[in-house]
Image (cartoon, rainbow, N blue to C red):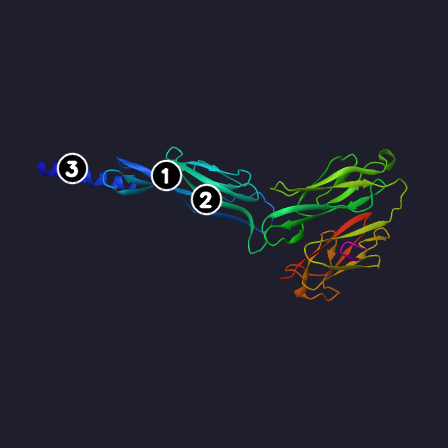
Amino acid sequence: MAGRILAYCCILAVLALTAGCSGNPSGAQLTGVSVTPTTVNFETNAPFFVPTTATAQLTATGTYTNGKNGTIYYQNITDQVVWSSSITAVATVNSAGLVSPAGCGITTINAAGGNGGLIATASVTVCEQSGSGAGSLTSLKVVAPPQGVSNRGDKAQFIALGTYAGSNATEDVTSKVSWSTSDARVATVDAAGLVTLTASCSDLGSGPEATITAVAPGSSLTGAASFVVGACGASSGSTLMVDQAGEGSGKVVSNPGEISCRGGEGCIGNFALNRPVTLTATPDPGSVFGGFSASCAPVVPDPSGCPANLREDGVKSCTCLTPAPNAAAVGAIFNTGH
């Protein structure tokens, strides 16, 4: 009987030691907190945040030190720390350490233990582009045609151009932003930035009548430009403007030959309404062509013979074709060379 009692006591002792190594043994104090992983990247193929179900699990580990014998113990305390995000507009974290992206940017996730006296962190980046040298969007510009439309149903093409951190590269983002109008009774705007006059010119007079705004999804970046109503009875021809953007430079010419554009000069031409107009870009030495805006469709194969080394990756042609609506802006992007 005494042997059984002794054996039983030995088993209890072993169990107590085992529990003490993995848990919080009597006399041990929390002396440190760590978080793994320490960095999380939610990569995308676009500079804008797109709602997603992707998540990342963070784990908090506590370091306990026994004040009597100096023994160190480690324990998973993910459900015991207080989790928080420094910028919840970028990413949120729940009480179990599960991180969910909310918008483009960088935030710090904190895990606080020991009544808040011990804090470990992890860095979370959202919208870092996979396989790209460009960072997140840093500026957004809306470009409006130079001449107002006059008749109900007339159309004006607006475009949006974005600049990125790191490389300072400029891209057309017309089809990626969210468009809105300040007054739908005056004009509407579709997802491609095409604005339609909905009011009668005689009811409005001439001058700016509505503001057209573009918003980058998942970001606070916005751009805006005025929608202008021209004088009643004005010509219903087409006015086309080429807006050169980017840190590089080059020349754009049109066919028919109303436009010969360099550095913002000679970049406006008047054409017959809905008559197709071809634009051709030629980058200067040290520059590469970054493409036309979505308002001008690329012509493939490229009749200009523009070689690949003068075009950015993904740009298939230095020539584009636009149907020339009542008023239109076309972006021509020239970035610095590779």
* Start-end of magenta stretch: 261-265
Asked whether 323 falls inside the magenta stretch, the response is no
Residue 185 image offset from top left, x and y in percent: 78, 34
- Kindly report which numbered mark, 3 or 1, lies closer to the viewer in this rendering: 1
Q: Residues within 10 Å of mark 3 (few under 14, many from 20)?
A: few
Residue 259 image offset from top left, x and y in percent: 82, 57
Residue 43 image offset from top left, x and y in percent: 54, 50
The label number, if any, that marks residue 122 in the structure image: 2
Q: Give the mark nearest the N terminus, 2 or 3.
A: 3
Q: Give the mark nearest the N terminus, 3 or 1.
A: 3
Residue 218 image offset from top left, x and y in percent: 60, 42
In the picture, measured across the screen, residue 74 lies left or right of residue 252, that is left
> On the rendered image, what quadrant is the C terminus found in?
bottom right
Q: Amino acid at mark 1?
A: Ile
Asked whether 263 falls inside the magenta stretch, the response is yes
Q: Amino acid at mark 2?
A: Ala
